[in-house]
Image (cartoon, rainbow, N blue to C red):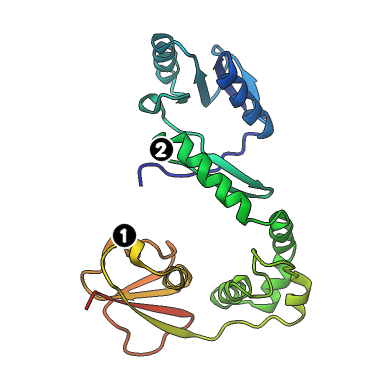
Amino acid sequence: MHSLPVFLRLAGRPVILLGAGDAAEAKRRLLERAGATIVGEEDTASLAIVAIEDAEGAEAAVARLRARGILVNAVDRPALCDFTLPAIVDRDPVLIAIGTGGASAGLAKALRQRIEALLPAGLGTLATALHGARDRIRRLFPEADARRRAIDAALDPGGPLDPLGETPDIELWLADPAGSDPVTVEIRLRSGDPDDLTLRETRWIARADTLCHEAGVPTAILDRARADARRMAGVPSAARPGVTVVLRGPA
């Protein structure tokens, strides 16, 4: 992973923007959407965007800003960037960011357009409803593991809260929430390439509370699981609570 994706809250915070022309104006609009206060080079800020077309001028500006400890994005100059600005799918409060580390803005744009077509306009409404129902969900499922499994089951394809479904209804789900039972799934890998996983296998790995694996299963596949999923070498001798996924190496 070449970069750590983060979402910065910029409302009311100063960001330096240098340069003129279409690229600078595009970055100005993006910063204004995020609520940032755009300031000049001599002002105090933690972030800066350099949209200067002249290569030498851009390099000099980046050097000056970095000397002050400011993190810099240099438009169309990935080698000079401390951070990059991704293509964004906005379903407020849901944000999806697509980055290529500066390798290809065109590829990020193409992926954004594909994802835009997949996601319903009401996705943000579902996120807001889930946030508003947090206390009720906690009362229904006091244990964190049971709560996570119930929410995962509701959000599954075809579930009552399927985010890609036509009418996810949180009130209907809360009236009769069915938590998922403990389950163990065994996956026999065809290769060590994560791209060879089926969509169903990828979903099971992402849902796993416990990930058990034989020796030799590549890290690239193990990393498809949640960061907080328990990992165990070998095959479990007894059933475990929640979703357990057993990964076996290629035959």
Q: Distance between the residues labelled 2 and 1?
A: 19 Å
Question: Of the residues shown, which amino acid type is indicated by label 1?
Answer: Ala
Q: Crowdedness of circle 1 by 10 Å Cα count: few (<14), some, many (20+)?
A: few
Which picture quadrant has residue 55?
top left
Q: Which residue is drawn at 48% across and 36% down?
A: 106
**Residue 101 bears which disc, if any?**
2
| Residue 30: percent from left, percent from top | 63, 31
Q: Quadrant of the C terminus?
A: bottom left
Taking the spot 54% from the left edge, 39% from the top edge, the residue there is 87
Q: Residues within 10 Å of mark 2 (few under 14, many from 20)?
A: some
Whether residue 225 is situated above or below residue 27 in the rendered picture: below
Q: In the figure, is residue 231 to the left or right of 18?
A: left
Q: Residue 220 carries which label?
A: 1
Extreme bottom residue here? 238
Which of the numbered marks, if any, corresponds to residue 145? Answer: none
Residue 35: image location, x then y, percent? 68, 32
Amino acid type of the residue tagged 2 in the rendering = Gly
Nearer-the-camera pick, 9 or 199? 199
